[in-house]
Image: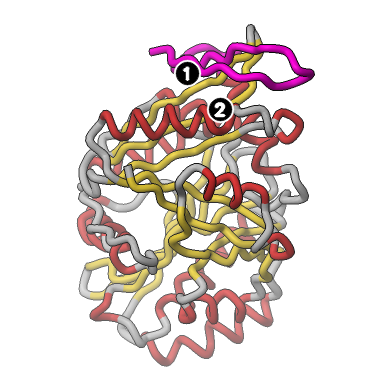
Amino acid sequence: MTTRASGSYGLGMETRLDIRRLDPHDDGQMQRFHEIGWRAEKEDDRPWSGFFTLTELTAFMREQAADRRVVGYCAFDGDQMVGAGALLLPQLDNLEKAFGFIHVEPELRGRGTGGALVEVVAQAARDDGRRLLMVDADVNYAERETAGVLRFAAAHGFSEVLDEVVRVLRLPVSQDRLDRLAGESAPRHEGYTLETYVDRLPRAYLRSYVHLRNQLMIDAPSGDVDFEASAVTAEILEEKLELSVRMGRTTFITVAVRDGEVVAHSDLSLPAGETYGWQLGTLVHRVHRGHRLGMATKVTNLRAVQRSHPDVVTVQTGNAETNQWMIAINVALGFEPVGVAVELKRHL
């Protein structure tokens, strides 16, 4: 598929912008696609902004999973790729929604490339029967009301849904702090066992673990957008965990178990060769809340990461400003705010 957009930009010269489907099996295209995304996210004084490593992105784009389909789009000015976009389409649940990603390098902005990519991605989502397109934008605190990316989003029909505070934890967390937090929570969760696994879980836990993970979509704050629970199965979860390994990630999964069932979990992912980690989901089953299992699983997981990966020096997380329970846990652990991730929507 090739979609064409034309405009006048640069030094006053007429330029034809070609937007083409990404060929994820073309190593050269993938490298440039990643470079654009990396620079778009990490620069503008936002080194904390999250993005895939090249290994992660290549595997993610090449290997489609049962629960999602991803299509990449490249904007070309002649032979040069100048913009990168992607469209993620859920395949099992929330089928009226699509998730978009638009990237243009800092010095190439203001020429219409981002706007052209937005319209191509929006049309592709509409053609697939989706009614809502959602995107994220990371901004520094000082630019929360003035960031150019938010003006750009508003100009292209997006409105704000939710703010997530982005926080970074510097490792190692002292053993004294971890011991104190673990000691404070331990009396509240007697009868539960805490177990940590790397990359894979015992089969006996898969069903209850995936059920818990599927609830995150409806338990996490989502502003004025309603989500339904994910519909991932134990078999699909196993495939996703294997894909994560092929993406070069090491994933630490700490679970709280009661009567042979996973009732709480906290997961943390480490990209290969990097010194940072990503805090993934942390969730406690509704029936088992009030036992400090959120704190207990996070502390146990951090201990495991620090023991086996002393080279990792930061962990990053994000929480909706309304999620005071999880924010309190993160503040107690030592996470410090660095910016805001703004979730945006556009009706199609």
Note whether residue 87 is visible: yes
Look at 69% across and 33% down and name the residue there: 109
Look at 42% across and 55% down and name the residue there: 197
Q: Quadrant of residue 28?
A: top right
Mark 2 crowd level (few <14, some 14–19, many ≥20, 10 Å Cα): many
Locate residue 143 relative to residue 152 in the image: left or right. right
* Disc 1, SS: loop
* Disc 2, SS: strand
Q: Amino acid at mark 1?
A: Leu
Look at 42% across and 66% down and name the residue there: 282
- Please name the colour scheme applied to the rendered image: secondary structure
Q: CA distance from mark 2 to mark 1?
A: 9 Å
Q: Nearer the viewer, residue 275 or 205?
A: 275
Question: Where's residue 117, x and y in %?
Answer: 50, 29
From the image, which quarter does the C terminus lie in?
top left
Note whether residue 232 is visible: no
Q: Nearer the viewer, residue 13 or 22?
A: 13
Q: Which residues are magenta?
A: 1-29
- Is residue 166 a member of the stretch shown in magenta? no
Q: What label does residue 333 carry, if any?
A: none
Question: Where's residue 287, x and y in %?
Answer: 23, 80
Q: What label does residue 22 carry, if any?
A: 1
The residue labelled by disc 2 is 84
Do the numbered discs 2 and 1 sit on residues whose CB atoms are within 8 Å? yes
From the image, which quarter does the N terminus lie in?
top left
Q: Amino acid at mark 2?
A: Ala
Q: Quadrant of residue 302?
A: bottom right
Look at the picture and state if 257 lies above or below 112: below
Look at 60% across and 50% down and name the residue there: 151
Look at the picture and state if 345 lies above or below 261: above
Question: Where's residue 43, x and y in %?
Answer: 74, 43
Locate residue 104 relative to residue 210 in the image: left or right. right
